[in-house]
Amino acid sequence: MSDFTRTTRRSVLSTIALAAAAAALPLAASAQNYPTKPITIVVPFAAGGTTDILARLVGQYLSTELGQPVVVENKAGAGGNIGAAFAAKAPADGHTLFMGTVGTHAINASLYKKLPYDPIKDFAPLTRVAMVPNLLVAHPSQPFKTVQEMIAYAKANPGKINFGSPGNGASPHLSGELFKSMAKVDMVHVPYKGSAPAVSDLLGGQISIMFDNLPSVIPHVRSGKLRAIAISTAKRSADLPDVPTIAEAGVPGYEATSWFGMFAPAATPAPVLAKISAALSKVLANAEVKKKIDDQGGEPANETPAQFADFIQKETQKWGKVVKESGASLD
């Protein structure tokens, strides 16, 4: 190799190294300066539901960690798809985050024929925030108090029981579809734009029952305004120890759990993602935050992005099978 060739090669390699370093500088600077303005957490359901409650709780403490205000923006509709699509298309600079759910990131891909976003390609998973049981509750006027009585009533009155949910494709909706399939009963699904309006109609007797996240309905159960029939998890809840699981109350093998996690748009720079992830880890390790999640009937979680991504993959496979077996499908 001639001296000229060696010199030229060194020059080219030096140029490439300098270019790579120069390209990395804006990313490092963006992480160092981040955040430079208020942060928005997009919630794909209406205010007042579990997703909204958890987003506001995390946002309050995240604001302290990152030194900027954190606001929640509710974008409800289409089982969380509207909010998810909005967040996926937001500027990928770390100033827009998304509180995703088992619906938006593990169920909807199987349930809907076409999604306006890709749950995997369009988002960077940050951490799971909480696991939450679904509680089967009924308006006190309903003529049943147990799962077996409800099944008997449903079979004697096909289509008379209507169940509300926060929207098509949400975990409470699919919990109801799974119940219909396993109990072999005919019930009518009534979708709402969020848990709060559905619970409001249940309290007013406009709908018969709901399979809803425990935090959204437990205050009404404790006040006597709603009747707790059974819980969706494999084990009873410590918050309602006298309420049986659906499996032990008459539908063996039944289990459905909601979860909630934080995401960012996929193209968000890695250094910014790392800074957000570290801040979220501190928030979710905070004893006050953990207690507040527990008080809401949830089980606190705190994962690395890699752990959360692996969990999502397993949940997608699990719920894809449930959707197929239940026959649920939406346009």
Image (cartoon, helix red, strand yellow):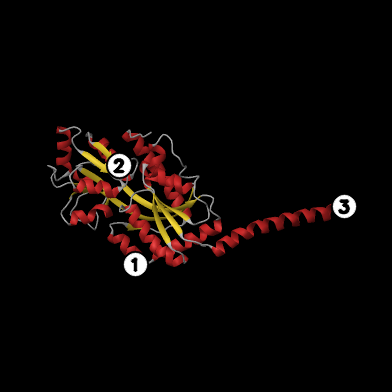
Query: What is the distance, in whole Å, between disc 2 and disc 1 at their CAs?
Result: 31 Å
Q: Tell me, for residue 288, which label it has, or none.
A: 1
Give the x, y percent position of residue 24.
Answer: 63, 58
Quarter placement of the C terminus: top left
Q: Counting other residues with Cα less than 10 Å from the Cα at mark 1, is it few (<14), some (14-19), or many (20 or more)?
A: few
Q: Amino acid at mark 2?
A: His
Give the x, y percent position of residue 319.
Answer: 37, 41
- For this view, does 188 lie left or right of residue 42? left
Q: Tell me, for residue 173, which label it has, or none.
A: 2
Q: Tell me, for residue 2, which label it has, or none.
A: 3
Which label's residue is closer to the chain start, 1 or 3?
3
Q: Amino acid at mark 1?
A: Glu
Pick the residue in front: 314 or 64. 64
The secondary structure type at the circle numbered 2 is helix
Pick the residue in front: 288 or 80. 80
Q: CB atoms at circles 1 and 3 under 8 Å apart? A: no
Q: Residue at x 34, y 44 (%)?
A: 170
Q: Amino acid at mark 3?
A: Ser
- The answer to whether one can see residue 253 in this image is no
Q: Counting other residues with Cα less than 10 Å from the Cα at mark 2, is it few (<14), some (14-19), or many (20 or more)?
A: many
Q: CB atoms at circles 2 and 1 under 8 Å apart? A: no
Point out the frontmost of discs 1 and 3: 1
Q: Tell me, for residue 122, which label it has, or none.
A: none
The secondary structure type at the circle numbered 3 is loop
Which label's residue is closer to the chain start, 2 or 3?
3
